Every structure is written in structure tokens, then in C-alpha cells.
Amino acid sequence: MALAIDIASGLLIAAGSFFILVGALALFRLPDVYTRAHGTSIIDTAGAGFLILGLMLQAGFTLVTLKLLFLLAISFFTLPVIGHALARAALHEKIAPKLAEDRRGRGRNSAGDGA
Amino acid sequence: MRTISLAGFLFAFWLVLSGHYTPMLVGAGLVSAILCALAARRMRVLDEEGHPIQLVVGALSYYPWLLWEIIKSAWAVTKVVLHPRLPISPTLTVVHASQKTAAARATYANSITLTPGTLTAGVSGDEFLVHALTREGALDLESGGMDRRVARFEGAA
Amino acid sequence: MFAGAAAAILVALALAVLRAIKGPTVFDRALAGNTVGSLAILLLAVFGFLTGRPEFLDIGITYGLLNLIGTLAVLKFFRHGDLAYDPEEER
């Protein structure tokens, strides 16, 4: 039983580390600020999620598990706020996103429009 | 009602963080939780936006679904990033939000941002400006599956 | 296992710091700074397990709360040049 838990948490931690590396690579490789923000969101959701889940299995049912859960909840609730503020501030400064396709014309009242 | 629930949440938070259960410390936690809840009530931030307990029932079925969406799209973005030629097609698009309350609409915008590959960049009225890493991600959001899901989550309350 | 995760986080930290140095815009740097913050939280959590001292988690929680405020303050400062701006000026 203890071995099964060890294997499961090892797999989860490995998956988390993998997603963290991918997110950092995305941060490094992608061409502009808006696309790089997607890399950060991989780190904070998939990477942190799997890693903390693995740590929770290691901790068992103790206070540490609850603290880890709280840590995960913090990153889940703060990440969208930061992503939104960052994209909005960058659009406000008129930093043009590199686009393959601009479908902003769909909106009735031209949402956002850079300000 | 909301005051009691907020005080309960704060007290549980105190218990998790402290880990010492002497009568003095638990009593101090209870007193400060109640004082904070009363202060929040006096500041009038305890409305259906500030402490949305009416959404708890819907959240129980919504968040597991959102987690699964996050894993799926994280894997999609991973394939794009690790691809040697980096096949991205960044797209700005406008998504319609059909939720009625501000809290549910904020949940929808946050869900879009939380899902890797899509990012809410602006809100005007009931339309979101969304940046997507690939064209497929943008079209997927435009089809409105997540929008309907959040609307149902709001309706369950 | 924990050491491997810590190594992965350190590599990711190095990439994020490189991005912060390269820029090119201030928003890239703010994004990289935020990423360094979230990676630091994860590193604290893993390090707590690595050394068998879960007290590090408390520091991680504090760091998580500060990370949000810090990044928002940086963004606000570079957008308005001031932390206490008048919303009327935006027009």
C-alpha cells in the first residue's frame, strides 16, 4: 500500500515537473508577451497542480495536506487576476500582439479595443 | 447569514494555519474571525459579489469539469510548445458571455484565463476580448461550450 | 524524487530569469518576475519535503499572497507611473 502511494505520488511529481519545464520553455521560446503568458499559465495550473497533488499524497491526511490545498487555491485564484491585468496593461500601452488572425470584428461593441 | 459563513471560513483558515490547539490560541482565532467578519459587514463588501456562497452548490460540479478542461488544454499547449517548428497561430477574438450576475461573469473570465492557451484581455459589457495561442482554441471558445457550462453553474445556485 | 522535482524547478527558474534579463518590454519582465514568484513557492513546498520540515509551507503561502500584490503593484506603476492615480486622468 505504501509502495503504491509512493509510485502514484512519484508519477504525479514527475508530471508536474514536466509541465513546469514545458511552461518555462514556452516562456523562453514564444515570440511576444501575450503568447508567453500562456506559458506561465501552464506552470501555475498543470505544473503546480500535479506537483502539489503528488506532495499531498506523500503527506498523507495531515495539516500539511490542507496547507498544500490552500497553496493550490491561492495560485488558482490569483493567476487569472495577474494574467488579465498583464494583458490589459500591455494592450493599453499599445504593444501590438503578433497575430495570425484578428477576429475582433465579431463583437458588437468592440470589446476592449486596447484601452 | 453571510457574516456567519465568512466568520466560519476565517476560523477554519486560522485552524489550518496555526496547528496549535490550546484554548487560548483557538479562542483568539475565534474572536479575530468574528471581528474581521463584522468589519467586512460594516465595510459593505459582504454582498453576493464579495462572498458568493450562493455559488457553492454549482461549484461542486463545475470545478471538477474545469480541472479536466485545464489538463486537456495544457496537454494541447504542451504539444504546440514542444513542436520543433512552433506551430502557433495567435488569434484575438471576441467571446459573448451570457451570464447574468457579475460573480458568474468573473468566473467565466477567470476560467478562460486559467485554461492554458486562452487569455481574457479585456471586458466590455457582456463581451470579452480573448487572446488565444492557436486558432483552434479561439474557435473552440467562440462555439460557447464553456459559456453554457458557466451559465448552468450560475443557474444551479 | 523530491530532488528531481527541485532540479526541474531550478532549471525553469533559470529560464524565467533569462527571460527577465532579455525583456524586451517591461511586461515581459513583469511576467517573468511573476513566474519566478510562483516557481519560488513550488520550490519552497518541495524543499520543505526534501528536508522534512513542512514549516516551509507557511512561507510559501505568505509568498503566494505577496506575489499577487507585488506583480499588480509593478504593473500599475508602469501603466500609470504612480501607485495612487486618479482614474479621471485615464481619459
Image: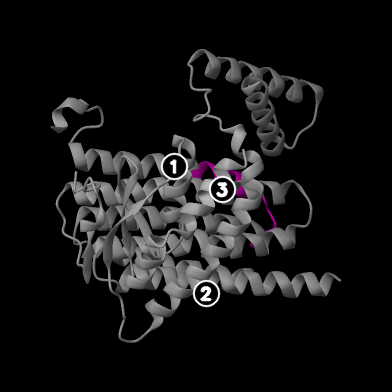
Crowding near pointer 2: few (<14 within 10 Å), some, many (20+)?
many
Frontmost of labels 1 and 2 is: 1
Mostly what secondary structure, the magenta segment? Answer: helix
Position of B152 compared to A57: left or right? left
Count residues near mark 1 (Cα–Cα under 10 Å), then give few for <14, some for 14-19, many for 20+: some
Residue furthest out toward the right: A1
In the rendered image, residue C50, in percent from the top left (x then y), is placed at 65, 63
Real-space CA distance between mark 1 and mark 2, rounded to the nearest whole angstrom: 30 Å
- Which residue is the site of mark 2? A18
Tell me the kind of residue under disc 2.
Answer: Phe
| Horizontal and vertical percent position of residue A115 | 19, 43
Q: Please tell me whether mark 2 sits on a helix, a strand or a loop.
A: helix
Residue at image x 22%, y 69%?
Answer: A101
Measured in 3D between alpha carbons, the distance from the residue under mark 3 to the one under mark 1, in whole angstroms, is 15 Å
Instruction: For residue C77, say whether it is visible.
Output: yes
Report the residue at 25% width, 57% height from top: A106
Badge 3 is on which residue? B152
The stretch in magenta equals C50-64
Q: Could you tell me which chain the residue with mark 2 belongs to?
A: A
Tag 1 residue: B106
Q: Position of residue C84 (x, y in %)?
A: 25, 27
Q: Nearer the viewer, residue B10 or B43?
A: B43
Q: Secondary structure at mark 3?
A: helix
Circles 1 and 2 on the same chain: no
Q: Chain of mark 3?
A: B
